[in-house]
C-alpha cells in the first residue's frame, strides 16, 4: 500500500514532448506493476492508463497506524457569569476539576 501511496507516472512510463508513453518493462523492473489499476483504449483508440488512488492508499495507511483521532463527543455547558469575581471563581473551580482528573487518570 505504501508503494501505491508513493506512486508516480514516472514509475510506469515516460513523458516526451508532453505525451505519456506507457513502459510496462520499466514498471516491472521497478516493481510497480501493482500500482496500475487498469489499461484500456478510448473510443478514439487512445491508450488510457489508470493508477490506484494514492490518496486512498495514504488514508488507509493513516488509519492502520492510528493517525486518525477517534470521534469524540463534547458537551458544553454555558454559564451565566455576571462579574469578574464570579468568572475567576468559576475558572479556579474548573482548574481544580482538571487537576483531579489528571491525577485520577495518571496524566
Image (tube, rainbow, N blue to C red):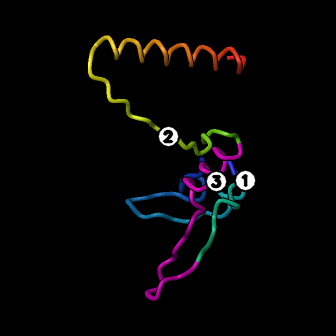
In the displayed structure, does residue 62 sit left or right of residue 20? right
Does residue 104 lie above or below 4 as drawn?
above
Q: Earlier in the sequence, mark 3 or mark 1?
A: 3
Image point (70%, 40%), residue name: 65
Q: Real-space Cα distance between discs 1 and 2?
A: 51 Å
- Residue tagged by mark 3? 4
Assess whether mark 3 and mark 2 are in contact (beta carbons under 8 angstroms).
no
**Mark drawn on residue 72:** none
Q: Which mark is residue 31?
A: 1
In the rendered image, the vertical position of residue 28 relative to residue 99, given as above or below: below
Magenta residues span 40-64
User: Earlier along the polypeptide chain: callout 2 or callout 3?
Assistant: 3
Q: Nearer the viewer, residue 92 or 38?
A: 92
Q: Is residue 78 left or right of residue 40?
A: left
Of marks 1 and 2, which one's residue comes earlier in the chain? Answer: 1
Query: Dot 1 surroundings within 10 Å: few (below 14), some, or many (20 or more)?
Result: few
Q: Position of residue 38 (x, y in %)?
A: 62, 72
Looking at the image, residue 56 lies above or below residue 91: below
Helix, strand or loop status at disc 3: helix
Amino acid at each position: 500500500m505504501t508503494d501505491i501511496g508513493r506512486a508516480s507516472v514516472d514509475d510506469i512510463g515516460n513523458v516526451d514532448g508532453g505525451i505519456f508513453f506507457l513502459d510496462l518493462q520499466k514498471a516491472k523492473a521497478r516493481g510497480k506493476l501493482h500500482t496500475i489499476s487498469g489499461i484500456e483504449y478510448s473510443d478514439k483508440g487512445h491508450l488510457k492508463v489508470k493508477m490506484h488512488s494514492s490518496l486512498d492508499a495514504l488514508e488507509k495507511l493513516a488509519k492502520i497506524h492510528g493517525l486518525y483521532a477517534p470521534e469524540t463527543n463534547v458537551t458544553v455547558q454555558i454559564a451565566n457569569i455576571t462579574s469578574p469575581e464570579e468568572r475567576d471563581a468559576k475558572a479556579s473551580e474548573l482548574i481544580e476539576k482538571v487537576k483531579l482528573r489528571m491525577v485520577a487518570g495518571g496524566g
